Amino acid sequence: MTQTLFCRAEMNYVKGEEPCTLEVDILDGRKHPLPGWQERGFELMQHNSAVEDWTDEVQIRQIHYGEIADLARELSGCDQALVGSHIKRNPEQAKLHEDLGPITFVHSDFAESYGDMMRQFYTGSSDEAQLGLNSVGITADQFSNARRLLVLQFWRNLGPKKMDLPIAFCEAESVAREELFTFPVTNYAGAGGLDFDTLGVEAPEDERHNWFTFPELGIDEIVVFRTYDSERVQQRRPFWTPHSAFRDPSVELGSPSRSSIELRATCLFL
């Protein structure tokens, strides 16, 4: 099957302990039929939201959190899905904190330790943890004893369809665990100041990593991607989905800048 190239672009990997920039093919996911998120790690789908004003934080919390929880349950078959926060990435947010700009570093958000970290968080005594549990009507013990934790993330473009730093996703099966390295993230603004371990990606010797993007995403489209799955951790199967913002060579920086929203659903199998 012919693969349609979207562009050649530089991706920021690591080689040893040093940054390493590697030019890669990024394929057009719209023109290349792809399996779903369970196999590739990511999937584009239609998703109409009832949110009318994406600048209204109250609307987002009162409407969109529930929409994403419903979608996460539908996609995964889980018993409960917790959606507790969101991240907007745009120039205004980036001015507030550098963590909130587009991330131009090849990574997958969470390492194997994430499940234990989440259990510790939700069995703790913080108001935020209790509010999250109350929102879905479960106890800390139920969270701690869940037989499976799955994290699905949802990415939506809020701005112009052509942007300077769109997002690309790497096929999970094309990246081996030996190519991933764990490093700590502390006081991350995009996660409410939490500390956790994330996964960076070593630059490959060849172009065996399969990169895809979905050009000109509309407001009624969403990309779902998996960043943690305790079941796959136990089975030593890919639970990661490497991703990164990249420079679209046809768009000058800031003309226009990316504007997007991300939500994370923690799916519980009780």
Image (cartoon, rainbow, N blue to C red):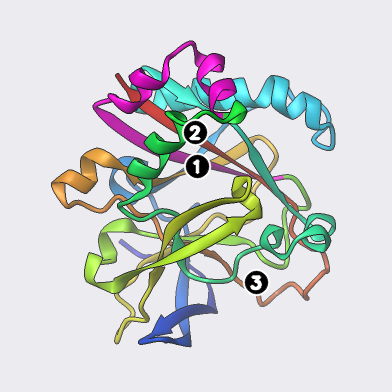
Question: Would you name the residue on which mark 1 appears?
Answer: 153
SS assignment at label 3: loop
Front position in the image: 125 or 93: 125
Residue at 55% x, 60% y: name it.
186
Q: Nearer the viewer, mark 1 or mark 3?
A: 1
Question: Residue type at mark 3?
Answer: Asp
User: Picture quarter containing residue 250?
Assistant: bottom right
Q: Nearer the viewer, residue 177 or 243?
A: 177
- Identify which residue is drawn at 72% across, 65% down: 98
Q: Residue furthest left?
A: 235
- Between tags 2 and 3, which lies in front? 2
The structure residue drawn at horizontal position 32% and vertical position 57%, both measured from the top left corner, is: 172
Q: Nearer the viewer, residue 12 or 112?
A: 112
The part of the chain drawn in magenta is 129-157
The reply, left or right, for residue 231 in relation to residue 44 is left
Which label is found at residue 248? 3
Q: Is residue 184 placed above or below 79 in the rendered structure? A: below
Q: Is residue 36 visible?
A: no
Q: Where is residue 118 shown, x and y percent of the image?
A: 42, 38
* Magenta highlight on residue 192: no
Q: Earlier in the sequence, mark 1 or mark 3?
A: 1
Q: Quadrant of residue 162?
A: bottom right
- Of label 2 and label 3, which has the lower sequence position? 3
Q: How many marks?
A: 3
Residue tagged 2: 265
Residue 144 colored magenta? yes
